[in-house]
Image: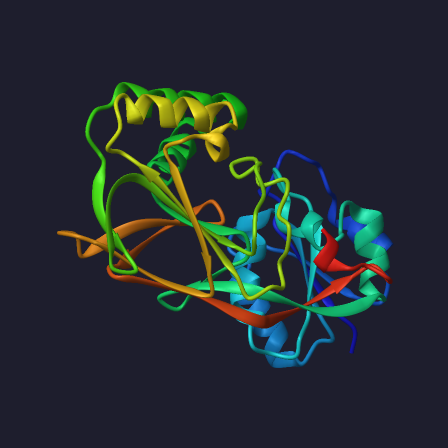
Amino acid sequence: MGGVILMNPAAGPDDLAVDELRERFPGHDVVECDGDVSEAAADALKRGVDFVGVAGGDGTIRSVAELLSGTDVPLLPIPAGTRNHFAKDVGVDDIDAAVAAASGDRVRVDVGDVNGHRFVNNSSIGVYPEIVIRREAHEKRLPKGIANVVAVWEQVRRRGQRFDVVVDDQRHTAWMVFVGNGKYGDGLIDLADRESIDGNCLDVRIALADKPMARVRLLLALLFGRLSRSQLLERMTTAAVDIDLEGRTVVEVALDGEVERLESPLRYRSLEGELWVLVPPGTNTADR
């Protein structure tokens, strides 16, 4: 019966019109959603569509990927958000690539899971979720880039907020714990150099808080995209990891840039090949 393409008009700065999508994807149903696309995606699954396309950013794509995980219905990511990391990592760099992918290849990719919540890029606790919350508040009156800088600067000025965490029985005092879906390279915060998305791997990084000036050094490294090269960072790769924040039962957790409140302990798992994705013909996701 063809596919359905869900559009989130508030996903990013680019103007992608519904009429343009209908013109570029003839024979498929294009639906403009008001905010959350999950309900429309669930309805599409019930109707038995060939695929579900999402024109939006990583947060919007995550909400649909969560519904499609474990099913035979593939996801078609259409980059229309602020950064579009997931779409680019599977070879869908622009609208032309998305059109090619609609009749292209089906590939399986891994999905991260924490306490039953899926994520396609990364999850984190600590400083980063706090920055996301403050950035979203500032975006009501500032452009997103400036709002992000202001939110980081606010964290530099604040004191405290470090936490004791047990990561697979190893105790740390940390500012942040990052869990990536797949293996990332040195550009951790820019998220521009994921090395794999189908290796059944979580990339875990712990930003330590037990060094002199650790908080300021961490946040400046975060602001300038140099955190991955910081001596304050510990790294491990694994298919599963348990993270327990001592003394806290509810934790703010960032999932692909959106913040959820989850119960501790946080049980992270890599779900191997959990999600079908449509990509342009001949795309090798293992090399991206």
Q: Residue at x 64, y 55 (%)?
A: 196
Rendered image quadrant of residue 90: bottom right
Is 88 on the left-hand or right-hand side of 273? right
Q: Residue at x 63, y 51 (%)?
A: 86
Is residue 143 visible in this depiction of the protein?
no
Give whichever of 116, 51 is nearer the camera. Answer: 116
Q: Residue at x 33, y 36 (%)?
A: 127
Is residue 109 visible in this depiction of the protein?
yes
Q: How many marks?
A: 0
The quarter in which the N terminus is drawn is bottom right
Position of residue 111 measured from the top left corner of the image (x, y, whole percent):
54, 64
Rendered image quadrant of residue 156: top left
Looking at the image, which residue sits at the far left?
A: 247
Position of residue 242 measured from the top left corner of the image (x, y, whole percent):
32, 62
- Please say if 99 is above or below 162: below
- Please say if 82 is above or below 280: above
Give whichever of 117, 108 is nearer the camera. Answer: 108
- Please say if 283 is above or below 271: above
Position of residue 275 measured from the top left corner of the image (x, y, whole percent):
61, 69
Position of residue 34 measured from the top left corner of the image (x, y, whole percent):
55, 52
Give whichever of 144, 187 is nearer the camera. Answer: 187
Is 37 on the left-hand or right-hand side of 217? right
- Please say if 161 is above or below 94: above
Rendered image quadrant of residue 168: bottom left
- What's the colour scheme? rainbow
Is 91 on the left-hand or right-hand side of 198? right
